[in-house]
Amino acid sequence: MENKNRGRPELLGADATLLQPIVATRSSFFHLALVLLGFTSFAFFAWLHQLRWGLGTTGLNVPVYWGSYITNFVFFIGISHAGTLISAILRLCHAEWRRSITRAAEVITVLVLFFGVGSIIVDLGRPDRMLNVLKHPNFRSPLLWDVCSVSTYLLASSIYLYLPLIPDIALLRDYAGKYTGFYRLLALGWQGTPRQWRVLNRAISVMAVLVIPIAISVHTVVSWVFGMTVQPMWHSTIFGPYFVVGAIFSGIASLIIAMALIRRIYFLQDYLKEIHFRHLGTLLLVFALLWFYFTFAEHLTTYYGHDPAHLAVFYSKLAGRYAPLFWGMVLTCLVIPVGILARRRTRPIRSAVVASVSVLVGMWLERFTIVIPTLAAPRVPWARVSYSPTWVELGITLGFSATFIFLYMVFTKFFPIVSIWEVQEGREAALTEVAERVKSYLPGPDVAGGAEVADGSVPELSRREGVG
Amino acid sequence: MARWGMVIDLAKCTACQACVVACQAENNVPCVEPEEAERGRILSWLAVVAEVQGSYPRVSMTTRPLPCMHCDSPPCIRVCPVQATGITPEGIVRQTFARCIGCRYCTNACPYTRRMFNWYRPEFRGELQLALNPDVTVRPKGVVEKCTLCHHRLMQAKESVRAEGRPLAEGDYVPACVEICPAGAMYFGDLEDPESRVAQLVRSPRAFRYLEELGTEPKVIFLSQGEWAGGKQEPR
């Protein structure tokens, strides 16, 4: 059966479009890839230059010891909350509209984490001694907590990406007619037997539950790198939740942009519909307001407390050297997205994308205006030197972003970016499942199967055997 | 066990910067080019920091020699991910150059900004090369360094008193900055020994610790300038 179908993805029926990016590659893909790899090699050159001469090639100085690299670190780790967290929460809530967006989100998480970790490595004065964090760990250091939580997160979110990929990899093995050996290896002998489905669904549910606390811990710990010091406007108890909210905020924004691009480039209008962008747009709006609430609370408390050391930082942000960046952040994180998303959206995709781009810019500025002003205004009246990134830092920042996009593109060439089996399952089973679930909410006797739906496992489906 | 500490009398300090130069020479701290200094890349284990109080026309200025405070509860040690910095039993906050990964978390956690980073490979040109102190390692690029209270002098002092067969006495071990101070504004010794000069000075009503409210418990103690601060009153 399998051999007969190989290389004939059209036999998949309606969902054959989802295999199209893997089966055929247009020349524009290679052109874009070349441009992106150009940025990558420039970043590599910049890094070699920095390794050769030292961190003096950056704009860092005394007392601004941390700059764009640490900003990028917090920013990239924040974006990683796109995936796993959003997808896990939507899965656990049985939000049916999740089906075609989970994969796109989970890939962001796994890939962007490498650039978060990469930012730290690039920031080190002695990357050659990196393994000292394993050889001589100091568990009192928030940076070591970071090492632990980020690596746990990378592991968990990779598993969480891989598990729902297995049935789709099996489809590719049977239909794609390309890289069959590679897919056979990764499919782990998936045949779609009822037992395999039961194990897989259970494993996905467990991972979805596990991944949420891990994701939250990751960004909390990132915030503690700053919060655990006594430095003005870093030493704040609100930083944990504030950073988590900001992370999910920028995560949703990057997910929206990725989805809009995928939709356009791979003609997936049928899968990533306006309604998805509407829902994500609403989520983005909620987080814009939540983010503003935290920002406001944080700054009002600082102002009211009137500690001179804190106030020096406060005024440098609101009215001093960093005011353009700070107010730019308020504009792009609050005014623009709320202005766009709070109105009735006639063109939901375009408005969600515009708001998301604005939020991404704003959240980078937010990270920047948290890291730098505090360092630039230490308690000791030290020489005040301004910080601005050099070409090395800009090159590495651009290169990291470009490489991330490149890897994302490559992923879409090997694996379906919309989960095929989840869409099929939605089409075939979810309708009755949702109807039963809604019935169970209403007064009256419980319908059969209600209990099974409630515990999160999908009822066993005989149609599985018919898929091949 | 000794607990080394320093007392700096701000009323005596003339801000002549001799301590800064002595420290630079003693500890092989590299000099940087003027352009780099402009960019805020000066390395100095000990700096004289000027603090301006009030606004024109009622302005006064305090100049404060600022070495590492050698805190008893140092924020820098807690945050180092690789235990490259620690506190010796005698209270000196040390840095292991060979282990430091250069993440600069300690430099950011120090409320006194008293930790320095090697932005480049240090350069000692011409005569500076000849003036290197053989007792102190030259740090590689990319690591953090800081005041060690001239720890090598403590090692030497311990060796020589052992050879002489006597215990360490006051004055055997003195850092370069204290030794050079022409105004005699800096004192150094064992804070545990009640007879030592520093222990007596610490009991002075003029004694205070810088940024004491942060709970870092510095072992560098300042003596305030007294009533004549700001030039309002003549010294008695």
Image (cartoon, coloured by chain):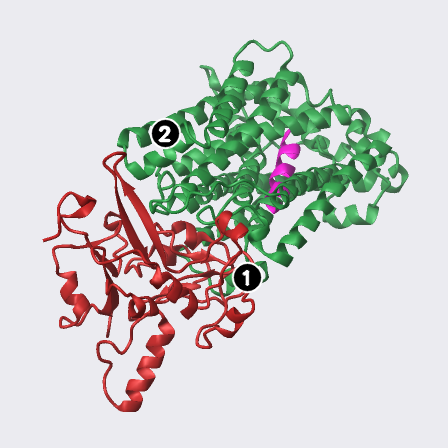
In front: A409, or A125?
A125
Residue A420: image location, x then y, percent: 72, 31
Q: Which chain letter matches label 2?
A: A
Q: Is residue A162 rendered to the left or right of residue B149? A: right
Residue A318 lies in the magenta stretch: no
Q: Colour of chain A?
A: green
Q: Badge 2 local density, few (<14 within 10 Å), some, or many (20+)? A: some
Check the picture and name the quadrant holding the N terminus of chain B: bottom left
* Residue A183 visible somewhere in the drawing: yes
Q: Is residue A164 rendered to the left or right of residue A208? A: right
Q: Badge 1 local density, few (<14 within 10 Å), some, or many (20+)? A: many
Residue A431: image location, x then y, percent: 63, 20
Question: Based on the displayed image, in which of its 4 quarters is residue B27 positioned?
Answer: bottom left
Question: Which one is closest to the eye, mark 1 or mark 2?
Answer: 1
Q: Which chain letter matches label 1?
A: B
Which kind of residue does numbered mark 2 sit on?
His
* Residue A100 visible somewhere in the drawing: no
Q: Residue furthest left?
A: B236
In front: A284, or A121?
A121
Residue A48: image location, x then y, percent: 67, 54
Q: Secondary structure at mark 2?
A: helix
Q: Which mark is residue B141?
A: 1
Q: Which residues are magenta?
A: A100-114
Q: Which residue is identified by label 2?
A: A299
Which kind of residue does numbered mark 1 sit on?
Lys
The residue shown at (33%, 37%) is A310
Q: Which mark is residue A227?
A: none
Contact between labelled residues 2 and 1, with CB atoms less than 8 Å apart:
no
Chain that the image shows in red: B
In front: A375, or B205?
B205
The residue shown at (45%, 57%) is B43
Residue B170: image location, x then y, percent: 22, 76
